[in-house]
Image: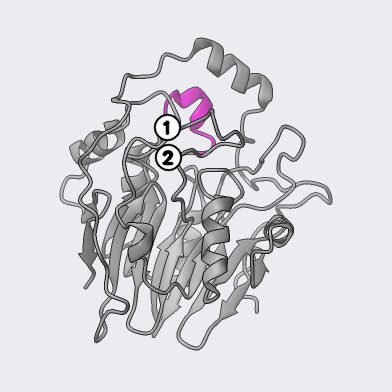
Amino acid sequence: MRIGAKFPAHFDGRRFFNPDATRARGWLDVFRWKLTSRPEPSPPFISDVLPFIPPERVQGNALRATMVNHSTVLLQYPEFNILTDPVWSERVSPIRWAGPRRRRKPGIAWEHLPPIDAVLITHNHYDHLDLPTLKRLALRGETSFIVPTGVARLLRSENIGPIRELDWGESLSFPSFTAHCVPALHFSSRSILDRNKTLWCGYAIEREAEFVYFAGDTAFGWHFARIREMFGPLRLALLPIGAYDPRWFMSRVHMAPEEAVRAHEILAARTSIAIHHGTFQLADEGLDAPKQRLLACLQGARFLVLSNGESADLP
């Protein structure tokens, strides 16, 4: 199903692109960044997570959001549970012995994970599409996987399913909710050969005429006003705040905390929760710098920074 408003063209016949936005930096810029990078020191591991044991279902008209880690949030409604970009692995990398390593435990132990009715995947980067975790979820046999255009092929090759692909503007209805696929300003790749061969996106989850927005990874841009126009004030927005330094490299694909606050205001979200921070150090800022920078610029906005394992019951 396609939602009413159309979005700008974002596919040239071979690759996807960000309409009305500056293109993401290329591989030469990646090498330039890595050669000049001076990451802020962070502890190799922080043992401050108090794991949470969620109920199988919440009651009444409740909406509970539990921060698992990074961009993984457990959204619990009375009738269904949703996981966003689930990651339980020790590394988010194509190589098991190298690449970004976990600095904090997940906020929910795997054995305490409740039934998951749907998983939302926003794009194919390793810190958002974690195949070992998705395989474990698929083996439980109770989960539907929703992915952007082009991503289903990878999951099917690993016997992960059932899967539904969505393009920007398309929707998928379940008995108790509808998932709407919306734009993000980002890019995709899992190797140097497949850049932008698959789509990236965010999602708006609709239940009883109320909406929760999961932004995934995105730069600041035109799409926030369009989402507000389409869905009205949001009950909740999950907005990324990390992996923003250096700005010359990251600003085209990741928001800084100040931009996330602007997005919160544009979206007219009743509450926002910060994601994409605190577990993997993916850029030059320190592990907890996004949280500190966000808290310093909130000025009264209802924008929560949950620790791994912390929950919020949303009005």
Residue sitting at x 46%, y 51%: 87
Q: Which residue corresponds to mark 2?
A: 255
**Magenta region, main secondary structure:** loop
Relative side of 290 to 84, left or right? left
Above or below, 234 relative to 47:
below
- How packed mark 2 is, by other alpha carbons closer than 10 Å (few <14, some 14-19, many 20 or more), is many
Identify which amino acid the numbered label 2 is placed on.
Met
How far across and how far down the image is residue 270, in percent?
A: 26, 65
Residue sitting at x 51%, y 66%: 119
Q: Which residue corresponds to mark 1?
A: 244
Above or below, 129 relative to 174:
above
Local secondary structure at mark 1: loop
Q: Judge whether residue 267 can be spotted in this image.
A: no
Q: Judge whether residue 5 can be spotted in this image.
A: yes
Local secondary structure at mark 2: loop
Q: Quadrant of the C terminus?
A: bottom left
Could you say which is closer to the camera, residue 175 or residue 99?
Answer: 99
Above or below, 1 relative to 70:
below
Mark 1 and mark 2 residues within 8 Å of each other at the beta carbon: yes
Q: Residue furthest left?
A: 300
Identify which amino acid the numbered label 1 is placed on.
Tyr
Residue sitting at x 49%, y 55%: 85
Q: Quadrant of the N terminus?
A: bottom right
Relative side of 125 to 257, left or right? right
Q: Residue furthest top?
A: 36
Relative side of 31 to 241, left or right? right
- Which span of residues is magenta-colored? 244-253
